[in-house]
Image (cartoon, grey):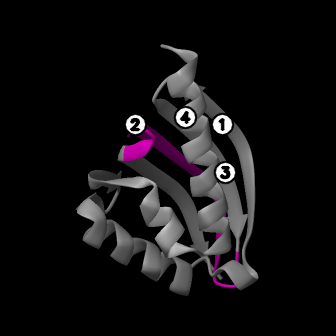
Amino acid sequence: MDSGSRKQTEKTLLHHWQAFGAGDVEAIMADYAKDAVLISADGPLKGHAQIRSMFEKVLANMFPPNSTSLNLAKQVVEGEIAYILWSGSSSFYNAAFATDTFVMHDGKIVAQTFAAQLEKK
């Protein structure tokens, strides 16, 4: 896989991580292709409307930016595929372990998986 796609993936991933930490839903959504799919244990979310709704709920009720600390423990990028291992804590939840895998195309997230060990406070 060429270094150009790797660099674009790293750039998008950094933007996505920073936007999530800032609680900026518009910036988060700018990283997704219009027909992106996000898969978690709750099932798939398809397209901007469903993914946006999930992030709005997560940022309001679980990890609001004013009370959240995040730690990126590991990042692996191979071309247009990225994996992150992270943890976080807010006044509402602890995420002792969380992981995301992203598939990107032309700098946009086209598919993502998410799993976490979440504890409500």
Residue drawn at point x = 45 percent, y = 80 percent: 56
Which amino acid lies under the numbered mark 2 shown in the image of this protein? Answer: Asp
For discs 4 and 3, the disc positioned in front in the rendered view: 4
How far across and down, in percent of the image, does residue 100 sit? Answer: 51, 47
Instruction: Tell me if 35 is positioned left or right of 95 in this view.
Output: left
Check residue 104 for magenta coloring: yes
For discs 3 and 2, the disc positioned in front in the rendered view: 2
Closer to the chain start, of discs 4 and 3, is 4
Which amino acid lies under the numbered mark 3 shown in the image of this protein? Answer: Trp
Closer to the chain start, of discs 3 and 1, is 1
How far across and down, in percent of the image, does residue 36 sit? Answer: 29, 52
For residue 106, the mark is 2
**Badge 2 element:** loop
For residue 88, the mark is none
Asked if disc 1 and disc 2 are in contact, CB closer than 8 Å, the reply is no
- Find residue 70 and report its image quarter: bottom right
**Label 2 – label 4 distance at C-alpha:** 8 Å
Q: Residues within 10 Å of mark 2 (few under 14, many from 20)?
A: few
* Vertical side of 14 occupied by 42: above or below: below
Residue drawn at point x = 47 percent, y = 52 percent: 115
Asked if disc 1 and disc 4 are in contact, CB closer than 8 Å, the reply is no
Residue carrying label 4: 8
Residue drawn at point x = 64 percent, y = 48 percent: 14
Residue carrying label 3: 86
For discs 1 and 4, the disc positioned in front in the rendered view: 4
Residue carrying label 1: 75
Q: Residues within 10 Å of mark 1 (few under 14, many from 20)?
A: some
Q: Which residues are magenta?
A: 90-109
